[in-house]
Amino acid sequence: MSTFGAIWAHNSTRRSLNGQDNPPMADRWQPDRSRGVFETLLVVDGEPIELKAHLSRLARSLDDVYAQPLPPHLEDKMRQAATEIPLGRLRCTVAPVEDGLQLDLLAGGVELEAVFPERGVHLRSHPITGGLGPHKWVDRKGINRPAPGEAGALIVDEGEVLEAGWANVFAVRGGTLFTPSVDGRLLPGTTRAALLELAASHGIESSEGPLHAKDLVAADETFLTGSIRGIEPALSLDGEELPGCGDLSYRLVGALRQRWGLRAPTAPEAAGDAPRAGQLSR
C-alpha cells in the first residue's frame, strides 16, 4: 500500500443483549491521500465563480498535505477551460506523483435545475471522529451527495453537527444565521464564506459555533451551501422533519444569485409546479 494509504473502520448500528439498537460507533476515517484533493467551481457565462477563494483553499491544502505549491499558471488554465461554458462546472484535481503533482482539469455543463435546487435533500447522521478535516479529498466514499430518494451523510462528531459530506450546513432561528465554526474538523466552504459576507452586508446577524441535531430540528430554517448548488433546502434528519428554507434563506438566495451573475428565478408556470414550504422555487 502507498505511504498515503487509507484507513477506514466503520461500526454499524449494534444490537444489545436486550434486543435494543444502540447508536452506531463513530467512524475512524483517514482518506487515501494518494488520490489527491480537488476543487469544483460553478461557471457562469465563461467565468469561474469564487475562483480566488477556491485557489486559496487549494493552495493551503497542497502545502499542508503534500508540501507543494499550486501548479504553475493554474489560474490562467482554469479561466481558459471555462471560457466557452455558459453554465457549467469546472473540476480541478491535484494528486501526488513521483516527481511532484499531477493536475487534471475537467469542464462540462450543468442543468439549470442543479443550481439552487428547489426540492432539497434529506440527511442521515454519519458519525466521524474528528470530522472530515479542512481539505476536499478525492476519496469521499460514502459521503457524496445522495442519489434521488436517498438520505445523504451529515457528519457529526460527539454529537456536534459539522457538515454534510458535500456541503456546509446552516440553521436560522430568530432571524440569526447559525453555522458550525471552521475549527479544522470541516471544510471551509467558499460558498459558506460568501454567504457570511452577504449576511453581514445585508444586516443579517450570524453566529459561528457548536450546532447539534436538536438545533436543526428547532430551527426556523435549515439549508446547505455548496459551490455548484448554492443554497439547498435541508428537509429532514434521521427521518425527523426539518423546516427547510424560509424568508431569510430566500433573501440570501437572491443576494448569492446576484453575486454569481445568475438571472433571477422565474415564477412557477402553474400552481401544481409550486414547491412545498421549505423548498426553493427556481
Image (cartoon, helix red, strand yellow):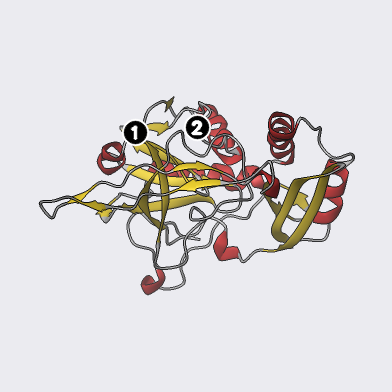
Q: Position of residue 84 (x, y in %)?
A: 82, 61
Give SS at disc 2: loop
* Residue drawn where x is 25% and y is 40% of the image: 218
Residue farthest toward the left in the current orientation of the protein = 18
| In this rendering, position of residue 166 left or right of residue 67 | left
| In this rendering, position of residue 269 left or right of residue 71 | left
Q: Position of residue 36 (x, y in %)?
A: 70, 46
Q: Position of residue 5 (x, y in %)?
A: 63, 45
Residues under numbered marks 1 and 2 in contact, where contact means CB atoms less than 8 Å apart: no
Residue named by callout 2? 185
Residue 247's tag is: none
Pick the residue in front: 9 or 26. Answer: 9
Q: Position of residue 221 (x, y in %)?
A: 35, 44
Q: Amino acid at mark 1?
A: Glu
| In this rendering, position of residue 26 left or right of residue 35 | left
* Residue drawn where x is 33% and y is 43% of the image: 25
Q: Quadrant of residue 208?
A: top left
Pick the residue in front: 95 or 107. Answer: 95
Could you give the CA–CA distance between mark 1 and mark 2, rounded to whole angstroms?
12 Å
* Residue drawn where x is 66% and y is 49% of the image: 1
Q: Amino acid at mark 2?
A: Arg
Give SS at disc 1: loop
Q: Circle 1: is it few (<14), some (14-19), or many (20+) Cα within 10 Å?
A: few
Q: Can residue 36 be seen here? A: no
- The vertical placement of 211 against 259, above or below, is above
Precedes in sequence: disc 1 or disc 2: 1
Q: Quadrant of residue 275?
A: bottom left
**Tally of numbered discs:** 2
Residue named by callout 1? 158
